[in-house]
Amino acid sequence: MLNKSIDVIIPVYKPDEKLDKLIERLQKQTKKPDHIILMSTRDGREEERVRKFGNVPNLSIHHIEKADFDHGGTRNLGASLSLAEFVLFMTQDAVPTDVHLIEEIVKPFENEEVATVYGRQLAGKNAGEVEKYTRVFNYPEKDSVKSKKDLERLGIKTYFCSNVCAAYRKSVYDEMGGFVLKTIFNEDMIMASKIIGAGYSISYAANAKVIHSHKYTYWQQFTRNFDLAVSQVQYKEIFAGVKSESEGIRLVKNSAKHLLTIGKWYMIPDLILQSGFKFLGYKFGQNYEKLPGKLVKKLSMNPSYWDKE
């Protein structure tokens, strides 16, 4: 797999110093990307920040209008610029932990049935205890491969895949028609459902590691889960038939046990509040079609999305 071509595609929107670290570490990989493609909005400050990467070998910067910047279309445009056998999508705040990220993420493609490989996300130093455990829960130390036969056992987890760090076999990506253009969230899981439905497999590479975590407020937890539920309602044909909420309940129970085990029982009220806001956001999102348009926009983490609706 080390002789196969791979391009890295990174949407850029209001970047910080993590993008600098990401570009720096991509250049030091044992398997170097053939091209790094930055998809940046036409904003004065952003253009100034990404312009300094102009001298990086095999890196190109492509500007798009802010109104056209979205989850699916921006990535599709980036992929259309690639002639590589594999495309690796990353977010601007995902920083490789070592020089082996690309080497590790292409290994599972040795299995011709594997169409997608996503990497492991580790929490940053400033992440809270609950966020750290959530990363361990969702991204364990052991590799795995998921296919259609796992739907009954894993439910919605079968489709779990994150474009924070996910590589796609370009031929299958094109066969699936790229990411959906109309979604507020979850373009990666919607693509994963198509890939699974077409008979391909999705691999999780535990040794392909990036630092990526957020310190969300309670309200941000609400709005993020609101958008998550909206995307599931918009694609009922994909998500209606698979188990979903039970996985969230299991995460809360396991998180509480973890806090008790490490002696941080005093953090359980915070866990309960976080989980409560997530649950309420999810429930409101499931019923967004019954809510006034102005309220929907206020409850969403991506209010600009509703301007296009």
Image (cartoon, rainbow, N blue to C red):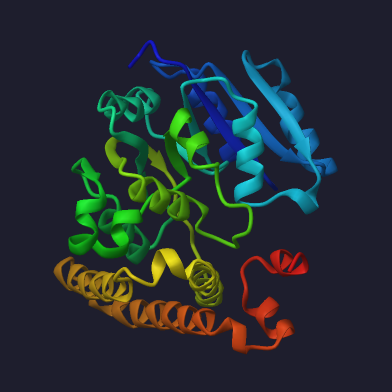
Q: Is residue 279 above or below residue 206?
A: below
Q: Which percent across, then down, holds residue 125?
A: 40, 50
**Which residue of the protein is positioned furthest toward the top in this rendering?**
3
Q: Quadrant of the image for the C terminus?
A: bottom right
Report the side of 91 relative to 157 (left or right): right
Closest to the observer: 248 or 292? Answer: 292
Indicate the quadrant where residue 51 lies: top right
Residue at 61% over, 41% down: 75
Q: x and y percent of residue 104 in the render? A: 31, 27
Q: Is residue 261 above or below residue 91?
A: below
Depth check: 82 or 199 in front? 199
Numbered disc total:
0
Q: Residue at x 55, y 60 (%)?
A: 185
**Vertical arrangement, residue 288 with respect to residue 112, above or below:** below
In this rendering, position of residue 268 left or right of residue 13: left
Q: Residue at x 48, y 36 (%)?
A: 175
